[in-house]
Image (spheres, rainbow, N blue to C red):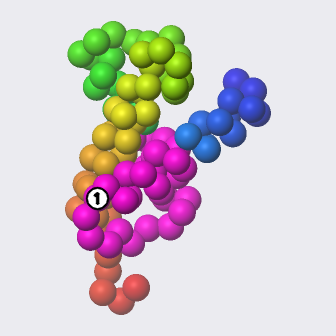
Amino acid sequence: MSLGSILSWIVCGLTVGICARFLVPGRQYMTLSMTTVLGIAGALVGGFFYSLLQGSSAVPFSLISHNWYGWIVSILGAVLLIWIYPWIYPRRWWL
């Protein structure tokens, strides 16, 4: 795994996480780094669920031909994680 591929996963995770935060109603109390982590994890969760239904794709993050669905399932996976996150780590009243 090269440095370029790691940076592309971080940028894709940040993009997916920000899109997902806009889709989840209410205020989310998390940092930009947590948004990136949940975006990357959401991409993995969304890709996993999609591969269970349709099989894996060779290029999931592409806008050419029919591979745009990788972005959609990644955002849906990140929405799921951002929606679940407050129940796993509730905000303390003293913070």
Name which residue lies at 75% across and 27% down.
2
Splitting the image into 4 quarters, where does residue 48 fall? top left
Asked if the stretch drawn in magenta spans residue 1, the answer is no
22 over 51 or under it: above or below: below
Asked if the stretch drawn in magenta spans residue 29, the answer is yes
Name which residue lies at 45% across and 19% down.
67
Most distant residue in the right direction: 3
11 over 64 or under it: above or below: below
Q: Position of residue 29 (x, y in %)?
A: 39, 72
In this view, the residue in front, 48 or 19, is 19
The amino acid on which the numbered mark 1 sits, given as a three-letter code, is Val
Compared across the picture, whether 84 is left or right of 30 comes to: left
81 over 61 or under it: above or below: below
37 over 1 or under it: above or below: below
Q: Which residue is mark 1?
A: 24
Name which residue lies at 26% across and 70% down.
26
From the image, which quarter does the C terminus lie in?
bottom left
Name which residue lies at 30% across and 22% down.
50
Q: Residues within 10 Å of mark 1 (few under 14, many from 20)?
A: some
Q: Position of residue 4 (x, y in %)?
A: 74, 32
Q: Position of residue 89 (x, y in %)?
A: 32, 64
Give the residues in magenta.
Answer: 13-42
Most distant residue in the bottom direction: 94
Q: Position of residue 88 (x, y in %)?
A: 27, 59
Query: Can residue 37 be spotted in the picture?
Result: no
